[in-house]
Image: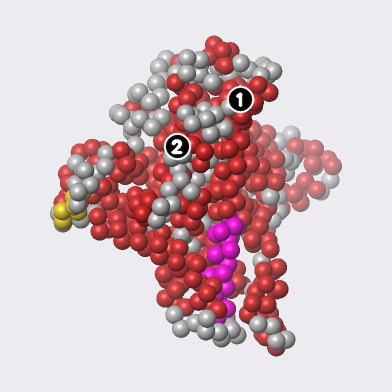
Amino acid sequence: MKRAGFVNRWLPMLLLAPQLVIIAIFFYWPAAHALHSSFFLQDPFGFGSTFVGWENYTDLAGNSEYRRIAWFTVLFTCLVTFFSLALALLLAVKADKVIRGARTYRTLIMWVYAVAPPVAGFIGVIMFNQSWGPLTRVFEYFGHDMTLGVNYNDTAFAMVLVSIWKQVPVNFIFFLSGLQSIPKSIREAALIDNRSASGRFWDVTFPLLAPTGFFLLIINITYALFDTFGVIDTLVKGEPGNNPMTLVYKVYVDGFRGNDLGGSSAQSVILMVLVLILTVVQFRLVERRIHYT
Amino acid sequence: MTEANPAAMAATAATPATRHRRRLRSGDILDHAVLIAGALFMLLPLLMVLQMTTVPDVEVIKTGPTLTIGDQLDENFEKAMFEASGFSGENTGVRMLINSFILGIGFAVGKIVIGMMAAYAIVYFRLRFATLAFWIIFTTLLLPLEVRILPSYEVVQKLGMLNSFQGLIIPLIASATATFFFRQFFRSVPEELVEAARIDGAGPVKFFIDILVPLSKTMVAAMFIIMFVYGWNQYLWPTMITTDEDMFTLVRGIKQITQVMEGNRIPEYGRANLLAIIAIVPPVFVVIFFQSWFVKGLTESDK
């Protein structure tokens, strides 16, 4: 609050009212509802529900399919996060270094930020088309018959690739702005001390980028967990079948297709706890980031 | 924001002779090669999809993307924009485009207006329950819509807002990203400003409209770009809330487009690809043309 704030009884309340009403109805009510119904077993025909305590949760823990999906989600998140960060860092370092065409390169790389995940998934479907997709042909050349939506591993590969493609621009923008905020004096000092470019990068630039990197790590994990829904939904063409899926997609499939409200709510609550932990870590990092710069 | 490494810039600017020598260094060539490869990785898929919108569907089935540019763009455009793909005959490309704009702009404007108002109340007023309000609002940053999607759907259903723009837009606004962003910005506005305004006898409403809003112009623009793209690209929420085909947005319709494309005897690749391009163009346009605002907004808001 500002020291010289206004004193007024009704105006601030009036200003806050729209925001508070919207989040009460569309945030707190649903969140409480999810928590509540995760302890109940819903009748499949909609006639009431019975209290089952932690049963929905223990069921999940014992469910081998759920465990398999959780395992895939972890693997998927690691792959997407690592490769999109690494690729973006490489491109950002090069884009920061070149003199000619720096702006053009920046534009050519960052435009994908504005592509919606399901549209990215659609482009993936085109690229991996069974009979003429360019990427299918590349695999054919190496003697592998790529079948998107049929073979588990092929579909998983396409999901990871498309998700990386979609995420590189965000990381690129953050890394580039992080690189450009490194003071000129530090760069010049490093130039005198260390003649090898790669030595300069690992000893000086990389540690200075670490706060940005940590922050992006959380952003990327959140992206891989939640925002890839559209990519997955279009790549499996709405038919989960034998295809790999992430935990968020499973919540949707169980709740909407399977009508297992209790189980789906329990899954939601597990994800909520996961996001809560990630966000707390993120807030800590944001604070640290401010101290760094 | 500088465009290039200042040290390298100084080295290049030295003399024409050194500049010439620098340009031929193998390291520079490698840098450009990496960047060109990166740009191609991002760009090639789009170019292939673009090429396929210009040739007849039969040719796509035979050869896939090629290097030739055909003459079918007009025809595909006509089909994509004015012919409906669903059963009701209502989801033409034009309809979906309009819906996408309503969602993108409605979401961005709603979020900015509500966020600015709340942030103003929190930062500039002496309020007994300010801390409480702050925490109530900022807890919403913790849980994205995706994890509370089912109960949110039930609430909207109970309120009878399915298949309406209110039901589409308002629940998406129930998160505090814009409020948080404007709170940070308002706190960086010098204290003297509000003191001077009060000495001059300006009330809170006058101060907000005449001083604070004009001061936040750049911030509003940056927020608008980010929120417009975010709203335009929404997928899961519209998929659940809108079942009437005349309410579909372009991004919401993409799955149906894929299914229609696969279901036909001769898949309509030209039309499907063109609709995907149309779904991409407006947000990409906004991001590219307002690049500096957008980058500033993105990197300074920290989510």
Is residue A222 shown left or right of residue A133? left
Q: Quadrant of residue A160?
A: top left
Tell me the CA gap for discs 1 and 2.
26 Å
Query: Which amino acid does the dot numbered 2 rest on?
Result: Val
Q: Could you tell me if residue A279 is visible in this image?
A: no
Chain of the residue on which disc 2 is drawn: A
Task: Check if residue B83 falls in the magenta segment.
Answer: no
Q: Residue tagged by mark 1? A: B79
For the stretch drawn in magenta, what is the main secondary structure?
A: helix
Q: Is residue B118 magenta?
A: yes
Q: Position of residue A230 (x, y in %)?
A: 44, 39
Crowding around mark 1 (Cα neighbors within 10 Å: few <14, some 14 to 19, many 20+) is many
Q: Residue drawn 24% across and 55% down?
A: A37
Tell me residue A227's x, y (percent): 44, 45
- The residue most toward the right is B16
What is the crowding at mark 2: few (fewer than 14 residues within 10 Å), some, or many (at least 20)?
Answer: many
Can you say whether A126 is above or below A143 in the image? Answer: below
**What SS does tag 2 mark?**
helix
Q: Is residue A283 left or right of residue B5?
A: left
> Image check: B65 left or right of A105?
left
- Report the disc number at residue B219: none
Q: Which residues are magenta?
A: B108-125
Placement of A126 over or under B290, stated as above or below: above
Residue at point 55%, 54% (across, down): B107
Q: Position of residue A163 (x, y in %)?
A: 46, 38
Q: Residue at x 75, y 37 (%)?
A: B23
x and y percentages locating residue B80 in the rendered image? 60, 28
Under mark 1, the amino acid is Lys
Residue located beneath label 2 in the image: A231
Instruction: Give the number of callouts.
Output: 2
